[in-house]
Image (tube, rainbow, N blue to C red):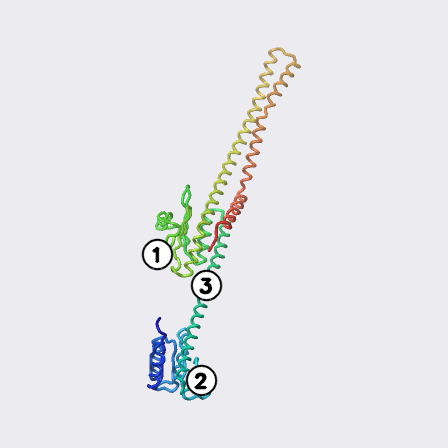
Amino acid sequence: MSKYSLLIAEDDEDLINVFELMLGEHFAVTTTTNGAEAIAEIQKKNFHIVIVDIHMPTKSGLEVCEFIQTLKPDRRPSVIVLSGDLSDENIHKAFSLGATDFVGKPFNVVAFHERIMRISRDIVQIKALRSDDDRRRSLADTAMKQASAYGSGLELLARLNKCKSIESLMEKITFGLLAQGYHCAVEFRSDSGRYNFDVDTRQCSENEQKIFQLLYDKGRIFHFGKRTIFNESNASLLVKNMPTEGTMSYDAAIDLFAKLVPALGSRFDALLNIQTMLSSREQLNETIKTVKHTIEIMERERKDNLEQIAATIGISFHELEMTETQERFFLDLIEKQLTADNTNERFGKVVELLEETAESLNSDELVDDEEEQIEDNFDDDIELF
């Protein structure tokens, strides 16, 4: 393991030699004999510990302490101040400038060595605690970003459930993601055709359409440059400004989009089913109109035929020289048999059934039913993060 760096700023050459013998085994030692050189060394290099004498040429030890205080906290070394002057003013000044310890001269070498080693262990432990704290903060930041993305994803899914057309679905998803900073294009596919939309230009360019055609079957996630495409069998989402790979934002984006695209595919299928049923309802209504019109024509023709038959039979009875009573009897009998035909009534019942069926295909009810089904699917199958 590499040694920690230690700077000794001391104008007593003999004492420097003692420090080097004492501490050289445990630290990478750098020595200076004046305060200006000490500051220059600290500017060039990060030190674990600095041992500085108060009284030195060019700049004093206290001035070195003042300079160290101007450094960023993560660059400041621990400072041990040495001095033969143990006045309260010197001690107070040293500690007010951030000194870790104040050692009076002369000092016990063994005690001083143990003190330096203890300070070094304390620094290592503090750094370990800071590192652990940074890791915890990083985990907390990640959790917060994931929670934010999760909440935004759920809110976006809720808005998608209210879309009643494929066009509004494409706009909702792309503008919803734009609000989170993502510039996207989306494509949906079915046997009847392809539907696509770009949030920036509203219409996908030829290049984007080619990207969808070439990559929709290249796996669930396909990266190329700063762009990433997320695929489902019937839906693709092209993200044009993915975060930098390896960052927390990138991981959160991958989680969001990978789970969002299947939900889009489910909603697209639901809208296709709704459109199919609405089309069936329109066709059924047209059929009902045709049947009603046909029944009305048949009813008019039947009445005309009855009147014509009655007139013809009346003439025939007259030629047979029947009495008026006989003619009336046979006419009533024939009319009763003809009017007994209830074909139109049966057709009428068929029409009523058709009208009830068409009414059951109410568009709002269809959308509500599909939304409930999609929400159930989200609860069971869609798990963000």
Label 3: which secondary element: helix
Q: Earlier in the sequence, mark 2 or mark 1?
A: 2
Image marks 2 and 1: residues in contact by CB distance under 8 Å? no
Q: Taking 155 as reference, is 275 above or below it?
A: above
Q: Earlier in the sequence, mark 3 or mark 1?
A: 3
- The quadrant holding residue 77 is bottom left
- Residue at point 41%, 74% (across, down): 72
Which residue bears the numbered disc 2? 93
Q: Taking 264 as reference, is 244 above or below it?
A: below
- Tell me the amino acid under the disc marked 2: Lys
Which residue bears the numbered disc 1? 225
Residue 381, horizontal then vertical, whole percent: 48, 49
Judged from this view, the residue extending furthest toward the front is: 110
How far separated are the C-alphas under marks 3 and 1? Answer: 28 Å
Residue 246, horizontal then vertical, whole percent: 39, 60
- Tell me the amino acid under the disc marked 3: Leu
Q: Earlier in the sequence, mark 2 or mark 3?
A: 2
Label 1: which secondary element: loop
Give residue 139's mark: 3
- Residue at point 62%, 10% (across, down): 321
Query: In the rendered image, is residue 53 in sight?
Result: yes
